[in-house]
Image: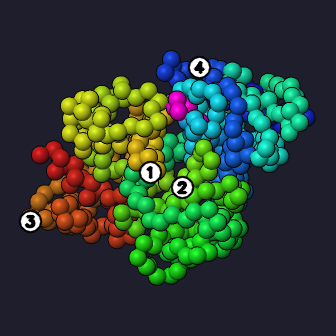
Amino acid sequence: MRAFAYQSKYESGNLALALAPALTPEGIVEKPSFFKGFALHPQVIARGLLVLADISATRYFKFIPVALRDPVLSAQGDRLRAECFSACNGVYARLDLLQSGFDGDIGFGTTNVDIGLELRKALTLVKQNDKLHVDIGSDGLSTTYFNQESNVIAMGKNVIERPVKMPDRWIRALGNAAEIHKGMDVGFMLKGPQAQAFIASLPPVTGKSQAGWLTPNRMGAKLSPSKTPGAVFVSGLNRLSALKRIMTNITNLTFYKPTEPGASMIVVEMPHCRITISLTAEAWHGYSGEGALLTSLAHPDLLDDSELISKKLSFNAIISALEMAKSWNMDTTRAEDALALLAVSGKLGYDAFDQAYFHRELPDDPDRILKDNPRLVAAQKLVESVSKTGDIQWMVPSGKVDYRVIYDPDNGIEKCTCAWYLKHQNKRGPCKHILAIQIKEEDF
């Protein structure tokens, strides 16, 4: 149970942003301190935070504005990362504030940051040429604001405590998002005016949900109903509308696509920072239900491997599976699966721009893996009854029905006769029958 001791507010030109108690290399710290110094591009930071606030307060599927959720803030030595999901859980957003945008040192740790209504109003007033002295920590994140004439205004305090609002399903969604982001490849890039033109053309958040294949053109990117070489499929362009906040600050816009049709991702580059937004394959899908990690979780000895690797984690901004494998004398596949398991508990995220995991630390729940993955529990119960009837054919009794499965992972063929597979194929992870076969195969 955590709370903000100092509520974020805006009063008489003062900005104050509250932090909850943090998990750090020294353990839980009631009053964390992540950074003290000047921000070189205050408007970019202000607008970036507003993008996250807009997304966390929006339900894009059947649009409804909702109460704000508190983004997760991680300090990783060379950058600050703030992450959140939309209220419908179908949009993931991350703001990466790089060390080059600050004049001081960044600390280490993870907590939640309060971005309330008062703060949102304040952030809209920050101008490009203003100076911003930032104190992330101590009594929350306190910021002394200097106007263009450099008149210093002292900051007041608000000591009303408020509970942290972070939905439990965010942790499950963070794990699924990490696995999906790991499979992303670059589609195409828009630079400068092209990128800004594309953002300007986006429909409003309340607009009709548009889906199709995006291809670059002189004016930005064109949406087409049919696939063309290099195109990236995007479902729900209105889910990107929050990016209009930073339209004039954008330098590059990179579109990512998965190795198979599904979720999509955009990475926005600005001076000394980046914003990553990823969308589920359908607007009504949520990241907490994607099931992307189930195949990795079917492997044995994962708990031991992940325990070893977790000992090496220290709020790293970049984590290499290859380096972890060398450190513990294990093959890269085992290290990748162990990292995937750590992502389930919210300990790791994945940055497609850097092609690497990063470490965040959230409150641990040893039972979370089973609790958040009921298909895994169901599959484990079916393992003993699985039988092989041919080279790639299997029979899986479940309830009163014998389900036939064709399982040939070497050729990418995994099919089942159950209702789950007929509805979703493998777009939301394998069904429990295919998963039971994967577990049995690993046992041998």
Whether 379 is drawn above or below 414: the answer is above
Q: Is residue 29 left or right of residue 441?
A: right
Report the Cα–Cα distance between label 2 and label 1: 9 Å
How far across and how far down the image is residue 163, in percent?
68, 32
Callout 4: 10 Å neighbours few (<14), some, many (20+)? some
Labelled disc at residue 267: 2
Q: Of discs 4 and 3, which sits in the foreground?
A: 4
Tell me how far mark 2 sits from mark 3, CA to CA.
46 Å
Please indicate, yes or no, whether residue 167 appears anywhere in the rendered image.
no
Q: Residue type at mark 3?
A: Gly
Q: Secondary structure at mark 4?
A: strand
> Earlier along the polypeptide chain: callout 4 or callout 3?
4
Q: Quadrant of the N terminus?
A: top right
Q: Which residue is mark 4?
A: 29
The secondary structure that dominates the magenta segment is strand
Q: Which residues are magenta?
A: 73-78
Per the image, the residue denoted by label 3 is 390
**Towards the viewer: 423 or 147:** 147
Write down the residue under mark 1: 352
Extreme-top residue of the structure:
26
Q: Mark 4 or mark 1: which comes first in sequence?
A: 4
**Point 63% across, 23% down: residue:** 33
Q: Are marks 2 and 3 in contact (CB under 8 Å)?
A: no
Q: Earlier in the sequence, mark 2 or mark 4?
A: 4
Does label 2 or label 3 sit earlier along the sequence?
A: 2
Drawn side of residue 231 relative to residue 410, left or right? right
Disc 1 residue crowd, few under 14, some 14–19, many 20+, Cα 10 Å: many
Kind of residue sitting beneath label 1: Ala
